[in-house]
């Protein structure tokens, strides 16, 4: 469970960083 939580947290952190760096790119990829 701890490992899974860490992975999710890492993914969230990466997504946040991407949004801060290139919100348009991330939105395009997500859409």
Image: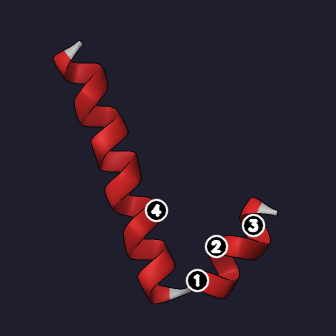
> How many numbered discs, if any?
4
Q: CA distance from mark 2 to mark 3?
A: 5 Å
Up-down: is 10 above or below 29?
A: above
- What residue sits 38% from the left and 61% below the top? 14
Which type of secondary structure does the marked residue at label 2 adopt?
A: helix
Residue 1: image location, x then y, percent: 24, 12
Marks 2/1 in contact by CB < 8 Å: the verdict is yes
Q: Residues within 10 Å of mark 2 (few under 14, many from 20)?
A: some
Residue at the farthest right position:
31
Q: CA distance from mark 3 to mark 4?
A: 12 Å
* C-alpha span from label 2 to label 1: 5 Å
Work out which residue is located at the far top of the displayed protein and give it: 1
Q: Secondary structure at mark 4?
A: helix
Q: Earlier in the sequence, mark 3 or mark 1?
A: 1
- Residue annotated with mark 4: 15
Residue 26, relative to residue 9: is it above or below? below
- Residue 7 placement (x, y as % from top left): 32, 34
Q: Are marks 2 and 3 in contact (CB under 8 Å)?
A: yes
Q: Is residue 14 above or below residue 9?
A: below
Q: Residues within 10 Å of mark 1 (few under 14, many from 20)?
A: some
């Amino acid at each position: 469970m701890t490992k899974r939580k860490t992975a999710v947290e890492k993914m969230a952190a990466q997504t946040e960083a991407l949004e801060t760096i290139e919100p348009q790119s991330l939105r395009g990829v997500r859409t």
